[in-house]
Amino acid sequence: MWNKLETRLKQRQAQDMMRHRLTLESGQDTEVSIAGEHFVNFSSNDYLGLASHPTLSEATQKAIHRYGLGSGASHLVVGHSEEHHRLEEELAEFLGVERALLFSSGFMANYGVLTSLFDRKDLLIQDKLNHASLIDGGRSSEAKMLRYAHNDMSALERQLKHQVDTKLIVTDGVFSMDGDLAPLPEMLELSEQYKAKLMVDDAHGFGVLGASGKGTLEHFELEQSRADIYMATFGKALGGYGAFVAGKSLLIESLVQFARSYIYTTAMPPAVAAANRAGLKLVQSEPERRQQLQNNIDYFKQLAADKNLPLMESDTAIQPILLGSNERAVAISQGLRSKGLLVVAIRPPTVPENSARLRVTLTANHKRQHIEQLIEAIAELQVKH
């Protein structure tokens, strides 16, 4: 065992694919401190700048004073507090669906859905670039799983022609490493034509996209109920932690009864649920944050185009710059860090071979000078590397 693991690590090292953790000495914000140095942070999913918002901190402190820290048990024993219950009700009301159910992470939510609701007579049809939690959940499910080329609706339609009990189309709303959107209107047409259901993982769309922040479906002016299964997280736009699944009461009650990743785990702390509630309220009461984020996205894309940077096609806060080789992506990422700019290099197996990239993420709190500094630095470094 140990020799095999050592060999695998050496291979990863030789391919410039080793992952390393950065230890922050500050809160999650536009500017962060690491090992005594300060950086402008372009790697966070804190799209609306809420992770360090005082309203979330105050909500957390009040809840800790009332409930303490840990929830002490699973939701189905004695771990389900009033904060959890209200958060689920407020999510359902905001989205206009019957019910919502909290999970401790997006990974656990997706895994729970795909491993508990489908059997050998069913078919899961997934985009090849879906999040790892969807792919792993599909692999662990009793259902058969097929995968189609990214956003290829012709390939999806071919796979939908299989005759099975239940067909579920599974897609990210916003693809986390590319920043592009699933073509939900076309997917819904196909799902209706072939009598399939649709599951949307909207981790990177919820709170950000749509006129009121309801996510990718609202962005396309679609009713939320058109997604049979809707999953989103609190750890991105809302600045909190955890995830939820929303939809019909029948769906939610089935997850309560059968999803092992819900049943057999400790509930998120009540204070975290309180912070998530505060984040949800801010999404609704401060729409200017979404507008400021959009302004920053537009400004970044304008400057990147002026410098002929190899931007991938994206209109969201995720703006990948395609560099190709692992070595080049790592070198430019390290060069940016030496200039006080934090942009993580994304490499295989997270993305396909020969598509290593800088994954730039923008937030509502970035200033124009931050964006200008980043573009100038990338333009300079890509010439050197």
Image (cartoon, helix red, strand yellow):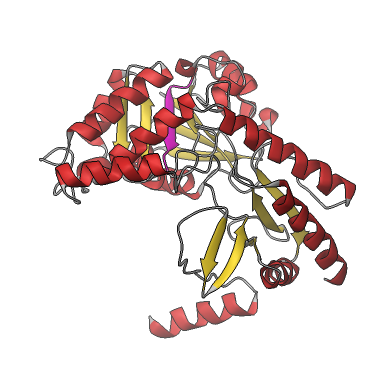
Determine the image quadrant of residue 272. top left
Question: At 51% across and 77% down in the image, what residue appears?
Answer: 8
Determine the image quadrant of residue 156. top right
Determine the image quadrant of residue 251. top left
Q: Nearer the viewer, residue 282 or 206?
A: 282
102 w.r.t. 33: above or below: above
The prevailing secondary structure element of the residues shown in magenta is strand
Span highlighted in magenta in the image: 227-234
Question: At 47% across and 69% down in the image, what residue appears?
Answer: 23
115 w.r.t. 155: above or below: below
Task: Identify the image quadrant of the C terminus.
Answer: bottom right
State left or right for residue 363 relative to residue 384. Answer: left
* Residue 16 position within the rendered picture, expressed as x and y whole percent measured from the top left: 64, 74
* Residue 83 position within the rendered picture, expressed as x and y whole percent measured from the top left: 23, 34
Q: Residue furthest left?
A: 78
Question: At 47% across and 25% down in the image, what residue appears?
Answer: 285
Q: Is residue 267 visible?
A: no
Q: Is residue 278 visible?
A: yes
State left or right for residue 93 relative to residue 162. Answer: left
Q: Nearer the viewer, residue 81 or 150?
A: 81
Question: At 24% across and 46% down in the image, what residue appears?
Answer: 269
161 w.r.t. 369: above or below: above
* Residue 359 position within the rendered picture, expressed as x and y whole percent measured from the top left: 65, 54
Magenta stretch containing residue 203, yes or no? no
Task: Identify the image quadrant of the N terminus.
Answer: bottom left
Q: Give the number of marks.
A: 0
State left or right for residue 384 relative to residue 160. Answer: right
State left or right for residue 243 relative to residue 332. Answer: left
